[in-house]
Image (cartoon, rainbow, N blue to C red):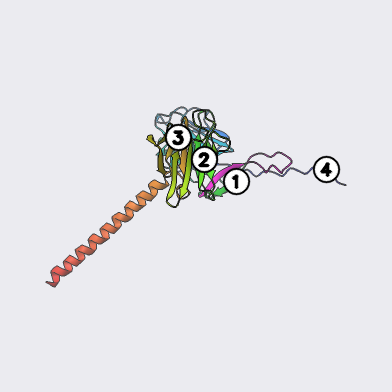
Amino acid sequence: MNTSSPKQEKTQVQPLCLISTKDGSRFELGSETLVGREVECKVLLDSPLISRYHAKLSISERGVLVEDLNSANGTFVNGRRIRDITAVSIGDELCFETQRFRLTSPESGNCDATAMLTRPSPKVAYEQDATIYLQPVTAAKLLVHNPSAAAYEVKLDADKKNWLIGRSAAADIQIDDASISREHARLRLSETGYYIETLSRQRPLLINGVRRSQSELRSGDEIRLGQSQLKLYTNDDARPGAREKRSELSAGISWLLTAAISLIAITLLLLFIFAS
């Protein structure tokens, strides 16, 4: 009888990279990658407009996160300047001052995938290293930033219609923050979108800095509960900047329609003049 222990399978790790959109320079990311002018920065950028320690990218079980390190000229994700730790996905554009990079994976070649870091199933008897799997963005999510812990993502199950938010262990979205109630707020999904409401009149919500007891939410909206901050990314707007891109597209279509109508009107006017 063979009593030998099962052999450990090799873990396939797909390295993530930042690639310059200007000259194709490639920087492979580690668990923590510094961006700046200092020689110890893995992404070393020689520009007086780049801070000595400009930004930091981290890869953890919660995904890929980028943090601006109080740089003078800012860090941007898909054209939007970030103020807090922000989750990014493969295909997203990161800009440090004016130097632009795209997050990608050499093996994937798919900019529409999302980098997800997962651990092996608990049924596996032996320990494996973390593996990066590439999956398409399919679920709405909340990015939770708790001052006493690192930022993390909460996926919103498409089969659910409401989520209880609070300190309670029974909460669907539990946040370990003494400044919020055990049952602080409720997030709802209706046919028209996401809504949030406070469950305590003494503790209103701050939605994008405005005090509200309830509010409709859009992708990118920031919700503050006590000292914690949540940011919503919806199914059709899962990446920061998507709403702005759609707005620009809508504006372009409107301009084309207006121009076409004006051209038709001028043509008809000329035909009427010549016919007379």
Asked if residue 98 is among those painted magenta in the image, a careful observer would answer: no
The span from disc 4 to disc 3 (Cα, nearest Å) is 59 Å
Report how far apart the C-alphas of labels 2 and 4 lie in the structure: 48 Å
Question: Which of the 4 image quadrants contains residue 265?
Answer: bottom left
- Amino acid type, label 4: Ser
* Residue 133 tag number: 1
In the image as oriented, which residue stretches furthest toward the bottom? 275
Depth check, mark 4 against mark 3: the one in front is 3
Q: Which residues are magenta?
A: 112-130
Mark sitting earlier along the chain (1/4): 4
In the image, is residue 120 part of the stretch drawn in magenta? yes
Q: Residues within 10 Å of mark 4 (few under 14, many from 20)?
A: few
Residue lying furthest front: 201
Q: CA distance from mark 2 to mark 3?
A: 13 Å
- The residue that label 2 is drawn on is 164
According to the picture, the residue beneath numbered tag 3 turns out to be: 200
